[in-house]
Amino acid sequence: MSGTGTGRTAGGGNAAGAAARLQKLFEGHRLTPTQRRIAHCMVRRAADAPFLSSVELAELAGVSQPSVTRFAVALGFDGYPALRRHLRDVPAAERGPAPGAYNAYQQAVYAEMENLRHLASLLADPKPVEHAGRLLAASCPLPVLGLRAASAQARGFAYFAAKVHPDVRLFDEGGTMLADRVDAARRAGASALLCFALPRHPREVTEALDHARSSGLTVVTVADSAFAPVARHSDLLLPAAVGTGLAFDTACAPMMLGRVLLEAMCDGLPDAQARLEEFDARAAARGLFVD
């Protein structure tokens, strides 16, 4: 059973660590769109990747078998067998608990913990997030896009952002009016758009991002992988892996990255603290909260 089109992965507690290793392996290489598709497929099937034949990987990624071979060569290997041997050569200390050590629910939690650890390692260099925060703070209005699986992340960000940003516009529904709403935000003065993009990636999202960029907006995207389909439609992509050990993907790391972006945006808004205090005063006067 799978609600996202990606089946359960055996040993889900180790899948996040494998995905992080793959991300690190792929980073820094100039990959073609087809190769990025293969990379994204391998990240999504991280636990299985070391055991897939080139034919199986090609079928999963929807590419030709020679494309898989060229992909391995682009990464610096003699061919796909050498890449697969490299992926199988994982130090015992990094393999995590043996299969069966935890039940499926525990494995899903441990996988999310690994996703968060990987996110923490990425944030050791805060410059990309700080740059994104400045872009979002400077955009007024600030459109926030998230469709289908990513709508909850976009809605959560927009809810908190509205407490400190003067004009946040949530785009969580697709359809023919989505481009109109992007155009309206641009005419009103928007300079950037924040997108949350999670699997499975709707075609509408890539089309909306292309339209936003052609309209002059800078696109900042939080996605599940640096090789996600939205990568080439974004100006600045910030990756945060999702968990795939349950029937439906889990998104603790993308949610955390959204909160980190909020913090970075607040640093770029000189009146953010004043706005928060004003909100608290109004909330107390209206008796909004019971605590």
Image: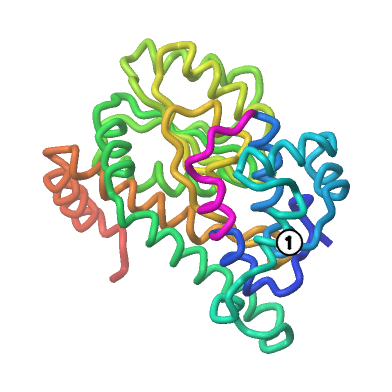
Is 50 placed above or below 180 here?
Answer: below
Q: Position of residue 24 (x, y in %)?
A: 51, 53
Q: Position of residue 161 (x, y in %)?
A: 32, 43
User: Residue 242 at what x, y percent from top left?
Assistant: 58, 57
Label 1 residue SS: helix
Task: Pick the quarter of the image with the N terminus.
Answer: bottom right
Residue on which disc 1 sits: 50
Q: Please tell me which residue lies in front, 184 or 70.
A: 70
Question: Which part of the image, by quadrant, shows the C terminus?
Answer: bottom left
The segment highlighted magenta reads 21-32
Q: Give the quadrant of residue 185.
A: top left
Residue 19: percent from left, percent from top = 60, 59
For residue 28: magenta?
A: yes
- Establish if 227 lies above or below 256: above
Give me the residue at 60% from left, 40% from top: 228
> For this view, does 105 lie left or right of residue 276?
right
The residue at 55%/75% (across/down) is 94
